[in-house]
Amino acid sequence: MYELEYAYEQSNDLNGYRVLRMAGKGVINTEPDVAQVTLTVVTRGETLSTSQSTNAKTMDQVIDQLIEIGLSTEQIRTVSYTIYPQYQYVGGEQQFIGYEVRNSIQVTIYDIGLVGEVVDEAVRNGVNEVSGLSFSVKDPQAVYRSALQEALEDAVLKAMSLTSAMQVTLDPTPIEINEQGAFSDPITPYTLTLEQSPTLTPIEPGMIEVEANLIAKFHYYS
């Protein structure tokens, strides 16, 4: 995208100038270095105390195993703990049958190669729901700044190409730069089911794409 604007201001040594508005786009593809996954232990029992104690024992076992394979306690946090009464219908009548307890932890993994092992060990030790697996980068702003730099270079190259075709002189230093759109942390969701874990869960996070867009204004002269 580009747009030509005409200005009638005078400078000391130039008869006048015109303004070229140019869009620039930068895209950086980078490997993720952070993964997050939610692990849930679901237990059911006839009494609340039985359901809670079974759940707590299982979750403690899961956390101990995650620490054993190299995670720290700072990488593990509880995100949800719920208790639901359970009913069934018999002969058209609702009957209470016990309680369901759900305890969910979110695990942050800084070694992408450990993701499959984390999931498998959690499942082996009692996790029966795996969700919210996603990949991101530790310093997304640094990646975005690189994309923003590429966007500016793109705008400059476009401006140079157009002014060359028009046989006019470009001042390649922008007089104004407007960033387009708000930055958001790049996160790539990953679909995973427990059926994928017969031995070792294969995890292929792929690449994360970070995009930056801007509008730059340039002076050019006849």
Image (cartoon, rainbow, N blue to C red):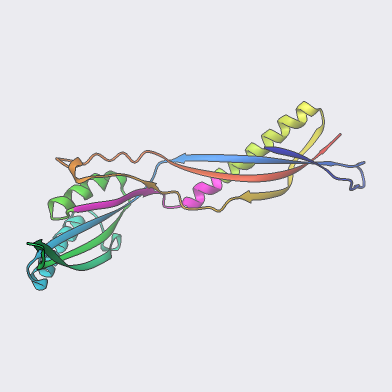
Q: Tell which of 84 and 219 is nearer to you.
A: 84
Q: Position of residue 106 (x, y in %)?
A: 28, 59
Q: Tell which of 94 and 14 is nearer to you.
A: 94
Q: Tell which of 161 and 146 is nearer to you.
A: 161
Total numbered badges shown on the rendered structure: 0
- Placement of the N terminus among the 4 image quadrants: top right
Magenta-drawn stretch contains 138: yes
Q: Position of residue 141 (x, y in %)?
A: 50, 52
Residue sitting at x 19%, y 68%: 83
Task: Determine the image quadrant of residue 212.
Answer: top right
Relative horizontal placement of residue 155, taking residue 105 as reference (left or right) = right
Residue sitting at x 55%, y 48%: 145
Q: Position of residue 214 (x, y in %)?
A: 63, 46
Residue sitting at x 13%, y 60%: 61
Residue bounds of the magenta highlight: 129-146
Task: Determine the image quadrant of residue 173.
Answer: top right
Q: Tell which of 57 and 43 is nearer to you.
A: 43
Magenta-drawn stretch contains 207: no
Relative horizontal placement of residue 122, taking residue 109 as reference (left or right) = left
Q: Position of residue 216 (x, y in %)?
A: 69, 44
Residue sitting at x 17%, y 55%: 127
- Placement of the C terminus among the 4 image quadrants: top right
Relative horizontal placement of residue 100, taking residue 155 as reference (left or right) = left
Name the outermost residue toward the front.
92
